[in-house]
Image (spheres, rainbow, N blue to C red):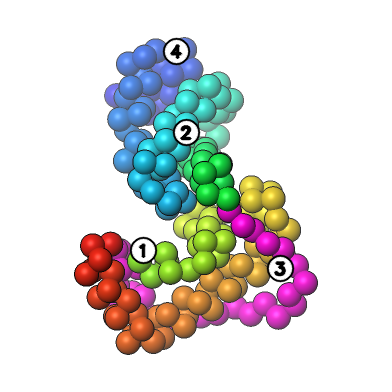
Amino acid sequence: METERIIQGCKSGDRKCQEALVYMFSPRLLAVCRRYCKDYALAEDALQETFINAFRYIHTYSGTGSFEGWLRRIAVTKSLEMQNKFFKLTMFSLETETNITESVIPDVYSTLGEQELAVILKKLPENQYIVFNLYVVEGYSHQEIAQLLSIAEGSSRSLLSRARQTLTTLLANPYQQSSYLFAQTLNGSL
């Protein structure tokens, strides 16, 4: 079934179209939820909340912009809400920090597999990890991140800068990186 027909069917409450929408977007949205939730069960709950809200507010989708992008924004918001509900997320203000530098991440990341890169990203402190994902992966602006996380825009910029610096350090030190990946493999995390 074509996406536009599914959307129109969902707007009119057609259960088969709702089922088709869930089937079409669940794998990608679950991946988004897993990036922001500490465990798989919480990510599944966030995914369910994503679809509940999508069906509740689908009438507000005007057709401008990507429908998947619209769903992804709901998934990110629901994931962060669920994460914060069960594991208090600490976003402290870093506005006073004036020395924000852009870090260049070494080309070493291009040789890493997706799972290895995900493990390295998970080494970031949670607040840096979330801002990094929102900015780099999801494409949010610092203003949007600040609003979503209830922090100052300068804090978003600072957390992103710190995340980049941490990644630069991790990627520049192959011994630290490989020993961490080896330990994660032994623990079954990879």
Report the span colored magenta.
89-117
Whether residue 22 is visible to the viewer of this picture, yes or no, is: yes
- Could you tell which of marks 4 and 1 lies nearer the N-terminus? 4
Residue at mark 2 to residue at mark 3: CA–CA distance = 31 Å
Nearest to the eye among marks 4 and 1: give it.
1
Three-letter residue code for mark 1:
Ala
Q: Residues within 10 Å of mark 4 (few under 14, many from 20)?
A: some
The residue shown at (22%, 69%) is 186
Does the stretch in magenta take in 73? no
Q: Which mark is residue 118?
A: 1
Which residue in the structure is indicated by mark 2? 50
**Observer-nearest residue: 140 or 125?**
125
Q: Secondary structure at mark 3?
A: loop
In the rendered image, the quadrant that contains the N terminus is top left
Whether residue 56 is situated above or below residue 124 in the rendered picture: above
Labels 2 & 3 near each other (Cβ < 8 A): no
- Could you tell which of marks 2 and 3 lies nearer the N-terminus? 2
Q: Secondary structure at mark 2?
A: helix
Which residue in the structure is indicated by mark 4? 13
Which residue in the structure is indicated by mark 3? 94
Whether residue 151 is situated above or below residue 77 in the rendered picture: below
The residue shown at (42%, 31%) is 48
Residue at mark 1 to residue at mark 3: CA–CA distance = 26 Å
Whether residue 144 is visible to the viewer of this picture, yes or no, is: no
Q: Secondary structure at mark 1?
A: helix
